[in-house]
Image: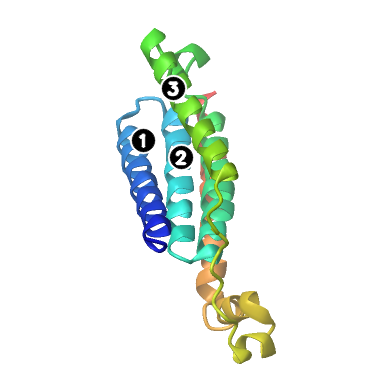
Amino acid sequence: MGNELPSLFYSFHFYLFGLVALASAIVFVTRKSPVAAAMWLVVTMFALAALYVLLDAQFVGVMQVLVYAGAIMVVFLFVIMLLNLGHPSELADMRGKWARFAAAFLGLALLAEILALSRTTLDLRLRVSPVPPSATATGGIIGSVAGPLFREYLLAFELTSVLLIAAIVGAVVLARKKG
């Protein structure tokens, strides 16, 4: 009985975040407004990060939030706003009383879950695997990831940054031609 409760807790949250990721991805694809679609994509990225943390990949979860939900989505929104795709009233995703009611209900449900998690007596500390001795000799866990990134994969890393800069320059050129 002692091991069933953490397993049930883990299973519940795994399926919850999986359902949130699937639902927000479907909503992301069905939005007409590009700004609303980008915001739903952020929700999908956060749900995926939570799944990574549940699968004991904390570093990948943090990078998911920092890189994708943070940096890449800021660039997406910058390009969308730069292109000036319509009147702000047309970009609204929440129309009608039922949509606002559903948003309020979802917000209260998430708040209740946060309160329940903060009051639980279960030992839910993150399980950290022991650090291999080779990782500490090369500059820690981050060094073992950054080393190959800046040695073997430096060209791909730099080409990706040039591609992102080219996308931003292209967005600026498209926006200037429109005005």
Q: Amino acid at mark 1?
A: Phe
| Foreground disc of the pair 2, 1 | 2
- Sooner in the amino-acid sequence: mark 2 or mark 1: 1
Instruction: Give the colour scheme shown.
Output: rainbow
**Structural crowding at the residue carrying mark 2, measured as other residues with C-alpha within 10 Å and reported as few (<14), some (14–19) or many (≥20):** some
Q: Which residue is mark 1?
A: 28
Is residue 11 visible in this depiction of the protein?
A: yes
133 sits left or right of 9 in the view = right
Q: Determine contact: label 2, label 1, CB under 8 Å.
A: yes
Picture quarter containing residue 77?
top right
Rounded to the nearest angstrom, the CA distance separating label 1 from label 3 is 20 Å
Q: Is residue 1 above or below residue 174?
A: below
Q: Which residue is mark 3?
A: 105
Disc marking residue 43: 2
Q: Residue at x 43, y 63 (%)?
A: 55
Where residue 107 appears, as percent x and y from the top left, is 49, 27
Where residue 61 appears, as percent x and y from the top left, is 51, 58
Location of the N terminus (image quadrant): bottom left
Work out whether residue 79 or residue 24 is closer to the camera in this orientation and state it: 24
Disc 3 is placed on an element classified as helix
| Foreground disc of the pair 1, 3 | 3
Disc 1 is placed on an element classified as helix
Location of the C terminus (image quadrant): top right
Where residue 162 appears, as percent x and y from the top left, is 56, 60
Is residue 96 visible in this depiction of the protein?
A: no
143 sits left or right of 2 in the view = right
Disc marking residue 56: none
Q: Amino acid at mark 2?
A: Val
**Structural crowding at the residue carrying mark 1, measured as other residues with C-alpha within 10 Å and reported as few (<14), some (14–19) or many (≥20):** many
